[in-house]
Amino acid sequence: MKSRQKQTSLNSKTSLLCICLSLLAFIITFLSGVQNSGPEDSTEEPSSDQNQILESEQYVEPDRGSCTAVAALLHFFLLATFSWNSMYGTQVVLLVRSMQRSLPSYWTQLSWGVGWGVPAVVTAITLAATYRVENPLAYRQEEFCWLAALDRNQEFSFEKPMFWAFIVPLGLVLLYNAVLLGLTSLTTCRVDPKLNSTKRSSLTQKFLVSFSLAVLLGLSWTLGYLVLVTMGTAHLACSVLFCLCTTTQGLQIFILFTARTPSFRAAASRSAHHLSAAAFSLRSTTYHLWKNRGQSRTSDMYRNTKSQDTKSQDTSI
């Protein structure tokens, strides 16, 4: 029984670690390669002694590979983040609803298969269905290394991979996460009058449990969906909230899932105690000056408090 409980705790930590790793990989890839540095950014000018035919608007240059690789990595890591969010939420629901401290024996293999396997399959199917070396814009955009979304008339197309390879899977994941959040909130806030407990369970703590799970299950991207369907003041408000929640998601996970744990609090308390108790040795000297009434001289005494045996020196002036 203890081994199964230990395995459950390890699964929970593994899920959080995979969420953070996939989110970190997505952010690093986005910041380093989302801008397409293609031939349109080149400053080389054609030679004037050669006749060249101007490229038409329908011309598509063959793919060089780097921008497509970045788009595929962004697609994979973002889907992996949401997949691991769903696996963590499912784990919480199973533990809370069943009132047990252990998960099924096959849970580790299932979580790894869904967390990393499903995003890899979706990314591979998208590449195989849309990507061609001679026409890479069927898979990705031209200016940004991300999934293609617009047709030749610069209008959103439901046939592009942006819709069926990202928006549809993301919508299904968010809908599933909303169901998980509802089940967990109902179980957490439900009170059984037959149970007596000496442990204080306040409304604030119950709210933090539900809010922590909501942050992890995709609160920011729910706001992103609202950005697509709202207009005017509501659109502006949702855009600001979406940017704030997305840019601080790592900090939110740290505060809600790490800083609130007893082990982290104990370690932080020990560190603060060691810092406050640090003693610095300071030099301290004492001078005694007096003047004898019967003699016309002044005596000074110097005492060094650092030495173990106090030594006094008298100097006559």
Image: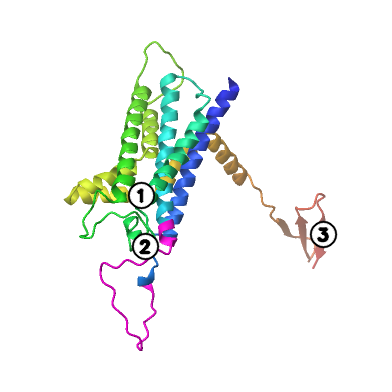
Residue 120 rendering spot, x and y as whole percentages: 44, 44
Point out the stretch of residues depicted in magenta.
41-69
Q: Is residue 109 left or right of residue 47?
A: right
User: Of the residues under marks 2 and 3, which one precedes in the sequence?
Assistant: 2
Single out the residue that lies furthest toward the top.
194
Residue placed most toward the observer, 198 or 182: 182
Q: Amino acid at mark 1?
A: Ala
Mark 2 vs mark 3: in front: 2
Residue highlighted by disc 2 = 134
Residue 129's tag is 1
Residue at point 52%, 36% (across, down) = 13
Q: Is residue 297 left or right of residue 150?
A: right
Disc 3 to disc 1: CB gap under 8 Å:
no
**Res 261 visible:** no
Label 3, label 1: how far apart the Cα atoms are: 95 Å
**Res 146 visible:** yes
Q: Where, quadrant-wise, is the N terminus in this rendering? A: top right
Residue 313's tag is 3
Q: At numbered mark 1, what does the secondary structure look like: helix, strand or loop?
A: helix
Image-quadrant location for residue 274: top right
Residue placed most toward the observer, 172 or 27: 172
User: Of the residues under marks 1 and 2, which one precedes in the sequence?
Assistant: 1
Residue 227 rendering spot, x and y as whole percentages: 25, 48
Residue at point 35%, 34% (across, down) = 177
Disc 2 to disc 3: CB gap under 8 Å:
no
Q: Amino acid at mark 2?
A: Glu
